[in-house]
Image (cartoon, rainbow, N blue to C red):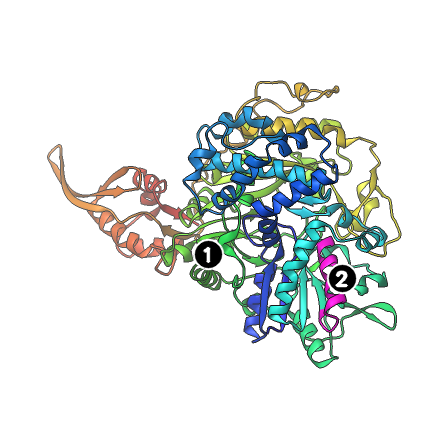
Amino acid sequence: MKDLLLITPPFTQLNTPYPATAYIKGFLNTKDISSFQSDLGIEVILELFNKNTFQQLFDMAFSSDAIVTENCQRIYALRKDYLKTLDAVILFLQGKNDTLARQLCTDNFLPQASRFQQLDDLEWAFGTMGMQDKAKHLATLYLEDLSDFIVECIDPNFGFSRYAERLGRSANSFDELYNHLKEKPTFIDELTLAILKEQLEEEEPKLVCFSVPFPGNLYSAFRCSQFIKANYPDVKIAMGGGFPNTELRSLTDVRVFEFFDFITLDDGELPLELVHEYVVNGEGELKRAFILEDGKVVYKNDSLRQDYKQQDVGTPDYADLQLTNYISVIEIANPMHSLWSDGRWNKLTMAHGCYWGKCTFCDISLDYIKIYEPVAASLLVDRVETLMEQTGESGFHFVDEAAPPSLMKAFALEVLKRNLTITWWTNIRFEKNFTQDLCFLLKASGCIAVSGGLEVASDRLLKLIDKGVTVEQVAQVTRNFTEANIMVHSYLMYGYPTQTVQETVDSLEMVRQLFELGIIQSGFWHQFALTAHSPVGLHPEEYGVMPDLKNITFANNDIDFKDRTGVDHSKFSFGLKKSLFNFMHGIGFDMSLQEWFDFKIPPSNISADYIYNCLQQEQVLSTKSTAKIAWIGSMPITAERVKKKKGMTWQQLEFRFHTNSDVYEITVDKDNGEWLLSMLEQLKPENKPLSYGQLKKNYETRLEDFELFWYSKQITGLRNHGLLVL
């Protein structure tokens, strides 16, 4: 018996659990509140994609005359081949049947329907990649074919990472979703409810809590709650998560509380603790919670208790989740997107909120962005070590809005200090603090990729967005990451208010040059969306936007609007995405921008070498006194040498540094050499970091003219082999 049952409803990711319930369970552990967590998404997927279930689906589709399209007729005709291979493919994607890769990569092993029509690009995309990745991609196409069959013949609302998303997206009124819930549960609903029933009877919770991060989870959360209300009326039900936090802040429809007893907003730790006390005691204070009171929706925020600090919320706890059963897929040949869908990642957060918190398209008025609170690096690495021990996985995705450079630096040094081997990636701002040396440090600590928003590659619009960066700065920062062998993904935006056609074309030209120079490896274009809680949404008149305001009783976030410029930005979508797909594969750079569009566009005003020129800035030969100095290379092998020239003799010290890929040598006079050798030992990450000022002071107690030595050819060489200024 557990106090709480924490549920992520179908569907989010196939490869790794969405972290909200793990975060909450970790917090509840600190309060000795017992809980059990479940990712219904992966459990339903595994129940759906197996031989026995698909035999039922094929029979159902045939008996209901639902097999209409040529594609589904082909899949049905090949059903024996699908049923023969399905269980083995799932095991392969779970990492439990690796030898199947060789068969998957041979012709005619897997039955193929419409998704395999894109195979012309396979050698292009995977020519330099391994057999396992190619096999994963083929297996993913195979599953997507079966998904198409489900959508066309069984349930039109199905999707691997969403279910009935249309019902949750911008649902200003509850009517459509409410009416849908009156209909008979679908086949997938029945699978979901059967699993839920087992968990309810085994755990006997007092309170069931649904974390709903996205619109594609909303319908299932309501369907599950409907089932609990009908069959377990004494069990109370709460909903929290990203969707209610952003969409349900204007909730007034009483019918919602036919399904839920509590809906909480923003950080869930304290609100859920108080809901638990309320359920146990039958009354009490609440924090940021909607309830039904006297037949009306009431927002209760009567607790004076402050939210917990990040240091006090505990370490995420992944217990109960079926960590070995998640499915790694490679949907498209985009190197960054594969990180989201391939491999098991432990999720952590470096800092609550955003340290910048100014971007005008972002929900900066809400607590999850507005309240910035970093976690101490030592505590963060403690959590890393705890999760490595608990899950057996050393991959980490830091799910920050924008990880702060200073904390990333401290985290990397702490990882190196503890001699850990981890792999990690996160989201950032392309800001000037990401120097070449910091990027090399991050790489040494296990950072493999970063994603960040270039948004609109136009300095006028970046200023209007209040992004705090320029295109030149983005180019320099992405170059620094790339030279450190850290992959860079850029979020790209079109259709920002007042954006002209010329600015869209110029933005594309900037993006073309960034990819041609190889300083960005991955990207994704998305059209600007107006959200209710962003500065543009709160003050549309200041941005030339005319919103289409509706009566809100349920969800309120995405707002329909008209841009006073009258530009139809949607017509650019296909050309922008097609060109980007080609740029990511290293081709199409010599094509004119006009060739990507089927309508007339103006020529770009951006010079062909604009980004190249941004990278040609002169190196500044100065170091701040407060800058931290670190040595992350190996200790050298040294040997004394005697040099003679024109009758003069002096002693030298030769340093030989072995790196993973080469050998590097320098020779300096003995006095400088002995000082340098002693300092390299002190500058290791496991020791207390020294500043440039401290280093200079130490040098000048014995020797003279530190700057002359610091900017010498020998030290400059070491700067490329592990001597970092941070």
Say which element carries label 1.
helix
Q: How many marks?
A: 2
Is 74 situated left or right of 328 in this image?
A: right
Q: Which quarter of the figure has residue 263?
A: bottom right
Q: Nearer the viewer, residue 466 or 27?
A: 27
Q: Residue at x 70, y 72 (%)?
A: 275
Percent coordinates x, y for residue 337 in the rendering: 56, 40
Q: Which quarter of the figure has residue 74?
A: top right
Say which element carries label 2.
helix
Is 175 situated left or right of 432 in this image?
A: right
In the image, residue 263 above or below residue 671: below
Residue positioned most to the left: 647
Q: Nearer the viewer, residue 437 or 225?
A: 225
Local packing at callout 1 (Cα closer than 10 Å; few below 14, some 14-19, many 20+) is some
Which amino acid lies under the numbered mark 2 shown in the image of this protein?
Gln
Which amino acid lies under the numbered mark 1 shown in the image of this protein?
Ala
Which part of the image, by quadrant, shows the N terminus? bottom right
Marks 2 and 1 close (CB-CB < 8 Å)? no
Marking on residue 6: none
In the image, residue 352 above or below residue 53: below
In the image, residue 203 above or below residue 402: below
Percent coordinates x, y for residue 118 in the rendering: 58, 27
Q: CA distance from mark 2 to mark 1?
A: 47 Å
In the image, residue 390 above or below residue 110: below
State which mark lies toward you, 2 or 1: 2
Q: Residue at x 75, y 20 (%)?
A: 599
Q: Which residue is mark 2?
A: 226
Q: Which residue is mark 1?
A: 410
Magenta part of the chain: 219-236
